[in-house]
Image (tube, grey):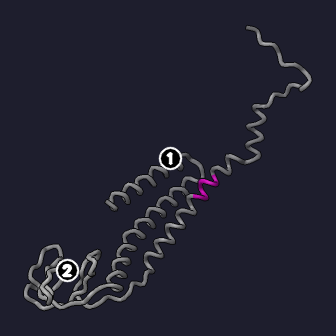
Amino acid sequence: MAALFAIGLQVLMLIAGAVLFSDTSRHRVAGWAGVVLLSVGYWGTGSLGGHDADQQAIHDRGVTGVGVVTKTRDDDMAQVRLGDGTTINVSGDGPGVGSTVEVIYDPLHRVDALFGPRPAAPGGRVPKVFLAVMIAGSVVIASSVAGRFGEALDPRRLRRRHALVVDDAPVDKAPPEVEA
């Protein structure tokens, strides 16, 4: 469900970019660059940030245990029976069936179990870089849009537009009669 939401948001960003930056103004390239930066930053923050969140959760509340591999699958998953008799699915390329392994698992079952000891806490540098890219994309889009609106509100342009509308007739004269 979250993946569909993310794809939908990406499509909306591209549609908004197509609408806002479809003209031939000088803000077009900067606007599209901002849309691309925002999309890349959004994707990287979401996907890599989720990985770091999982690693942090297994680091904080993970429980280590020793068990025996009872079954392996082709999708890098294995079933491990722990010493207390519970069976858990463990992700990762583990040893063959019948091998004794050390695993770490989340007692709340919100994060996939892993082979090996408790992992170190994530550094979080990569998601922060993607977050900075997303912020930069937002700033570029905002400045492009503000530049377009700033040009539209340029006092020189407004005077020229206003000059076309203003009637140069003297104020003390009555307007000409319109015949029906």
| Distance from the alpha carbon under mark 1 to that under mark 2 | 47 Å
Q: Which residues are magenta?
A: 142-147
| Residue at the disc numbered 2 | 90
| Residue nearest the viewer, comparing 113 with 153 | 113
Q: Is residue 119 above or below residue 162?
A: below
User: Would residue 99 be found to the left or right of residue 180 on screen?
Assistant: left
Q: Which residue is at 9% across, 79% downward?
A: 71
Q: Is residue 34 above or below residue 169?
A: below
Q: Residue furthest right?
A: 172
Using a 10 Å C-alpha cutoff, classify the residue at mark 1 as few (fewer than 14 neighbours), some (14 to 19) or many (20 or more): few
Instruction: Tell me the chief SS of the magenta region.
Output: helix
Q: Which residue is at 27% across, 81% downward?
A: 106
Q: Where does residue 84 sit, x and y in percent of width and height?
A: 14, 88
Quarter of the image with the N terminus in it: bottom left
Q: Where does residue 102 sit, x and y in percent of width and height?
A: 20, 91
User: Comparing marks 1 and 2, which lies closer to the viewer?
Assistant: 2
Q: Which amino acid type is marked by label 2?
A: Val
Q: Where does residue 72 sit, x and y in percent of width and height?
A: 11, 78
| Residue at the disc numbered 1 | 19
